[in-house]
Amino acid sequence: MADFEISDVLQSKPDAAHASKTFYLETFGCQMNVHDSEKVIGTLTQQGYHQVDTEEAADLILYNTCSIRDKAEQKVFNRLNDYKKLVKQGKRFGVLGCVAQQEGEQIFERAPYVSLVSGSASYRKLPEMLVRLELGEKRITGLDDRQTEETFETEFTARSNQHRGYITIIEGCDKFCAYCVVPYTRGKERSRTSTSVLAEAQRMADSGYTEIQLLGQNVNSYRDTEGKKSFAELLAAVGEIPGIRRVRFTTSHPRDFTRDIVEAIDAVPTLCDHVHLPVQSGSSDVLHMMQREYTRDWYLERISWIKAAKRKISMTTDIIVGFPGETPADFEQTVTLLHEVQYDGVFAFKYSPRPNTPAITMPDSISDEVKSQRLQILLERQREIQRFTYEKHVGEVLEVMVEGHNQARGQVIGRTSQNKTLNFTTGQPILPAGGSYLPVRVTKSFPNSLVGESVA
Ligand code: SAH
Ligand code: SF4
Ligand code: F3S
């Protein structure tokens, strides 16, 4: 269908015609997906749709999907299967996100009642696709062939939190690690201009946001297409917007982790003192097989920059255990790396063979049992490390942003700049509102959270 016909339809349909259109959207996967969903919700609302809380109440059921590991992908097909009975009631289904891009039109074969399949690189075309859906088309696809230069920007983003919000600054990935689907599901690496990022951050500050989290599959691979700002300069510029009190960024890739990022954190107090820097393995041999293109020592050099900062910066990482060919000695090197770095948090996963990736053709020599054992050992060791890294805060006064309340315990849930949960009491009958900032003295620690009392 030609574009002019679509816009004709868009203009000729009064809002009332959409008034009863309802949608349900469920999101799986990473923060990029969560934020994409906020933009999708904004786009749908702009098109006259209303969001509802259940599949049963919706005309259009959307799943924004993740395929990073097999389990994540299976969840989506299970969900589609659970709800296919609703098709008889005239409801329509759409699959968005990474499984959509990965499986493409095969989704129509596996789940013939699905009418819309779109990867994230095609979301700009959502308004057109929705119109085609309304006109009764049964098989609408938005699939990217790794050619697009477009990013998904919309002024209608429906952010779910009033105080802190995401901004995607770079989409896609060109790194092609041997195990990973992302370069195939998210398209090629493409950055927004710093002008557009800063304008969005300013709009957020103007409407009362105090915390901004910059997002990208590899956020620090950011390249300003206008050539105005490096990633570190962009971080600083966002942090200097009046009203912004906290800036976070995730996920950093070791290969593009430069010293000026640490210098920016030291220089600009609003930049949070936390870096998430996935290492994946502590063994240079495994890193080589993973095509990470750095060694253990190279990674540890970046960690030494972070440790040498004037501020105490917390560090977290991602680990994959049981990559094909990982020997017990390789695994041991990952464990020693955890001890050497002293992370404040680790997300560890069993290697999951993924379609299209080079690693799928490597013999998956590690049994699931061994992967599980390694995962368990790793998590136990890390728990001990965190017992120590969290204990260090006892006695300190830290600023928290209030995230919510635990009414049953009379506690307030806060988050520190280092991204740690700090549950505290105030001794006051009225609890502080979500989004407020307070100084809190830490009185006790656990491996995953802190406890304290406000000192206001
Ligand atoms: N771009 C980031 C990671 C994004 S994916 C980086 O390169 O660091 C998030 C995490 O999922 C990865 O860090 C990795 O630990 C995990 N992951 C990716 N593919 C995986 C697979 N096939 N099996 C298990 N874990 C995987
Ligand atoms: Fe996946 Fe590697 Fe890209 Fe990270 S850098 S998203 S692990 S391919
Ligand atoms: Fe999953 Fe896609 Fe994010 S595979 S982790 S939703 S980039």
Image (tube, grey):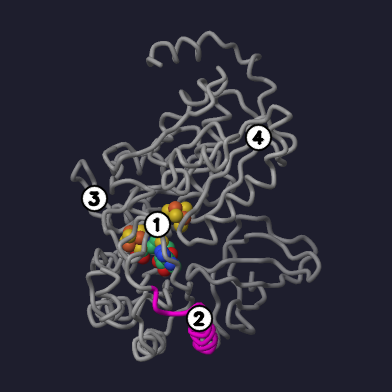
User: How many angstroms separate mark 2 from mark 4 (CA)?
Assistant: 39 Å
Task: Work out whether 452 lies above or below 217.
Answer: below
Residue 332, x across and y down, in percent: 39, 90
Write down the quadrant of residue 253 in the picture. bottom left
User: How many angstroms separate mark 2 from mark 3 (CA)?
Assistant: 35 Å
Rendered residue at 43%/57% (across/down) = 247
Residue 186, x across and y down, in percent: 37, 48
Q: Count neighbours of disc 2 (C-alpha within 10 A) and say few if under 14, some if 14 to 19, many if 20 or more.
A: some
Q: Amino acid at mark 2?
A: Leu
**Residue at mark 3:** 223
**Residue contact between numbered discs 2 and 3, judged by CB atoms under 8 Å:** no
Label 4's element?
strand
Label 1's element?
loop
Residue 251 makes an appearance in the image? no
Please give the count of numbered marks on the rendered protein: 4
User: How many angstroms separate mark 4 from mark 3 (CA)?
Assistant: 35 Å
User: How many angstroms separate mark 4 from mark 1 (CA)?
Assistant: 33 Å
Magenta residues? 364-386
Label 2's element?
helix
**Residue at mark 2:** 375
Residue 406 makes an appearance in the image? yes
Q: Count neighbours of disc 4 (C-alpha within 10 A) and say few if under 14, some if 14 to 19, many if 20 or more.
A: some
**Residue at mark 1:** 355
Residue 384, x across and y down, in percent: 53, 89
Task: Work out whether 381 lies above or below 365.
Answer: below
**Residue at mark 4:** 51
